[in-house]
Amino acid sequence: MGKVKNSPWLLHYDGSSCNGCDIEVLATLTPLYDAERFGIENTGDPMQADILLITGGINTQNQEVVRQLYNQMPRPKVVVAVGVCACTGGVFKDCYNVLGGADSTIPVDIYVPGCAARPQAIIDGIVKAVELFQKRSDRHDRYEIEQKEGGNANG
Amino acid sequence: MAEVIHPEDELRVIDWNLLLETAMEMKNAGLRLSQACVSYVAGKYELVYSFVNDETYKLTNVKVIMETTDWIPSICAFYPYALFYENEMKELYGVDVRMMEGTDLNNKLYRIRETTPLLPKEKK
Amino acid sequence: MGKRKVVPFGPQHPVLPEPIHLDLVMEDEKILEAVPNIGFVHRGLEGLIEKKDFNELIYIAERTCGICSYQHGMGYTETLEQIMGVEIPDRAKFLRSTWSELGRLHSHLLWLGLLADGFGFESLFYECWRIREKILDLHELTVGARLIFSVNKVGGVLRDITPEMQKTILETLDVVEEEVKNIQKTFLYDYSVQSRLKGIGVLSLQQVHDLGCAGPFARASGLNLDMRKLGYDAYPYIDFEPIISTDGDCFARCDVRTREIFQSIDIIRQIFAKMPEGDIAVPVKGMPNGEATVRIEQPRGEAVYYVKGNGKKLLDRMRIRTPTFANLPGLLETMKGADLSDVPLLILSIDPCISCTER
């Protein structure tokens, strides 16, 4: 991992998961596996979050909720799908109420498989998400600087 | 060896018009409604209500077999928390439960898009 | 007379681990009633009986919930064994009880941590979960997975616990017992914890009986009800009594669950002292034909399993009634007259497992 300039904050939402992957996500943030050493903090507010961790599949009731959470997060943002139910629908793919994985509703960047996903794999996914967030943040900063200089030249 | 209480379970099959009387008898005996479910077997609905005695741990299953066109009264007058079980029966299997003043959620317990998803396709 | 307003709570909230929506009808900081709106976790897994046969349904039943996952698989398998008339060997019964009690330990420690996070005591939350990791290491030692382990089959279990593993388990449980005694002092005697938990959400014995509640939530109000007294698996050979308190508030529920941790450690010691030798499984032929109802004691209360088969591979009905489904009316009753700031603690005090409820 290269140099990390900022500390991205995390938002965790459970959409129709069995709770196994949620418990493992919370266990990743406790002192034994300690994902917080990368500067990450688990916040409950979507408007202050940079990385979204989704567990569980999408069903007809929570499709709107997930879309609203994704829209409330400010750009740049990264989405990580944790667990095989969030990747493709998992064991419950044929159920009448499950529409699929998280990518049926929002664009997903990183997929972490497993049932339940182990904390070591979740840390791997979070590290990749932090690197990707750094790249997007740099690109966003350069775009803003170009806009400002373009505006000064015209104005 | 520790003390173990394992009474025999009981199964009663009754007609639908005796349901309210049986529920009143169970309530007066101090039994608790443990669960209520419905299955679709051979073209008919089979409803099973489980009542449990908390002192002797005895389980009494009350079974009602009815046609899909019949209706069944609600037992919420004796067991107010039965509304969750009865709304689930209505929403997932399409059982016609009547006399549910004030406890009918109008198929909005789980708010799913399909109607009566657990009935086989040829019956809908 | 103040003005009435409706405050929506959930489905995404910093203190909630799972999505549930409540509409709180309030008048000036006091709640008049709470109207629930569930269905966010409804997958409809009881509809999978049309597509998967009765052996594959063991894997589906286990994934109903990730915390009480072992007991769901065990309850469903015992119902099938009762229908097919299969008697499993004694050693398999003792092994199933061991994993059951380890599951109860990890579930109660998880709940204690979430309760501490609910009233803002984050370092206590991290401490409880650090102790819980030792129990998950024991899971990994005996079965190979941390949360969801498919070790049940119709006729017995698939893996054995050797005497070396038993020695490691007993040594780890000694360490866990010492550490839980330390944090128990904080939960029971600390002034700020008591002021958040005492006198909140009181339910009397008559109310608990009328609302049909189960598990530690009901035992904290004085109801003497524990399904382990029915004597399934190894429990006829174990000496224990249900743990009861009479106050009926959130503090009593915390007290009951903490004492159940010590009781579970004691039960595992008795199980290892009396475990018989023998096979761990018997071969089984045929298809299930008939119906059966089985009740077991999960960490959250009484769970009822009803299965009906007709002699073919696909079942007619599989029904799981989980303890949180029975405790929901009790939760709505405790909300009446409560303050808005106590709502997260009241929801956490029934130990909600919404994915179990909605399946």
Image: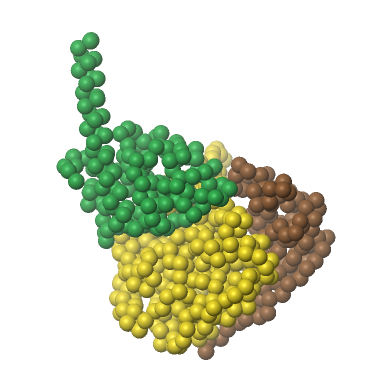
Chain colours: A green, B brown, C yellow
Q: Is residue B70 left or right of residue B5?
A: right
* Residue C200 image point, x, y percent: 48, 59
Q: Position of residue B4 (x, y in %)?
A: 58, 84
Residue name at image x 66 percent, y 76 percent: B58
Residue C115, image x, y percentages: 40, 59
Residue C156 visible in this rendered orientation of the protein: yes
The residue positioned 38% from the left and 55% from the top of the image is A114
Whether A49 is drawn above or below C173: the answer is above
| Residue at screen point 23% across, 47% down | A39
Q: Please tell me whether residue A114 is drawn above or below residue C281 in the rendered image.
A: above
Query: What quarter of the picture does the N terminus of chain C occupy?
Result: top right
**C171 to C330, vertically: above or below:** below
C188, C147: nearer the viewer: C147
**Is residue C41 something that shows in the picture?**
no
Q: Quadrant of the C terminus of chain C?
A: bottom right
Q: Is residue C234 left or right of residue A49?
A: right
Q: Quadrant of residue A109?
A: top left
- Point 41% across, 87% down: residue: C273
